[in-house]
């Protein structure tokens, strides 16, 4: 996990920004390119700026890395809608 930088304390992050956190106000966008894998919170309605949550240069978009990303971001606690720019086929089950 040394190759992934991430934030897993969203209430603390929002507190530091002086904002209230409500998971229903955001959706999680996951994207990769040839150079990086990243996860960003997008505000529903786009009234607030996006919030970068995770970034990795060596990781690529595959099942195991997406599973790791969702785990470290504590997806099950937040249950955001997820937006992908999918470049792969997989059956994703979060437990």
Image (cartoon, rainbow, N blue to C red):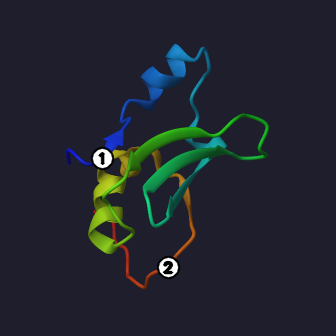
User: What residue would you read off at disc 1?
Assistant: 4
Please tell me which residue lies in front, 21 or 43.
Answer: 43
Where residue 81 appears, as percent x and y from the top left, is 57, 58
Quadrant location of residue 23? top right
Asked if residue 78 is positioned above or below residue 90 in the image, the reply reads above
12 horizontally vs 29: left or right: left
65 horizontally vs 38: left or right: left
Q: Secondary structure at mark 2?
A: loop
Crowd class of label 2 (few under 14; some 14 to 19; many from 20; radius 10 Å): few
33 horizontally vs 69: left or right: right
Q: Residue at x 57, y 44 (%)?
A: 41
Which disc number belongs to residue 53? none
Residue that extends furthest to the left in the rendered view of this protein: 2
Please tell me which residue lies in front, 24 or 40.
Answer: 40
Crowd class of label 1 (few under 14; some 14 to 19; many from 20; radius 10 Å): some
Quadrant location of residue 54? top left
Q: Earlier in the sequence, mark 1 or mark 2?
A: 1
Where residue 30 appears, as percent x and y from the top left, is 51, 59
Where residue 58 appears, as percent x and y from the top left, is 31, 58
CA separation, marks 1 and 2? 20 Å
Looking at the rendered image, the quarter that the C terminus falls into is: bottom left
User: What residue would you read off at disc 2?
Assistant: 87
Asked if residue 34 is positioned above or below residue 24 in the image, the reply reads below
Q: Residue at x 39, y 44 (%)?
A: 77
């Amino acid at each position: 996990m040394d190759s992934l930088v991430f934030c897993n304390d969203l209430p603390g992050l929002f507190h530091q920004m002086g904002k209230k956190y409500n998971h229903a106000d955001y959706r999680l966008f996951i994207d990769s390119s040839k150079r990086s894998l990243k996860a960003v919170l997008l505000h529903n309605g786009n009234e607030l700026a996006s919030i970068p949550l995770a970034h990795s240069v060596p990781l690529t978009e595959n099942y195991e890395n997406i599973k790791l990303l969702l785990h470290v971001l504590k997806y099950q606690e937040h249950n955001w809608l997820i937006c992908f720019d999918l470049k792969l086929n997989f059956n994703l089950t979060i437990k």
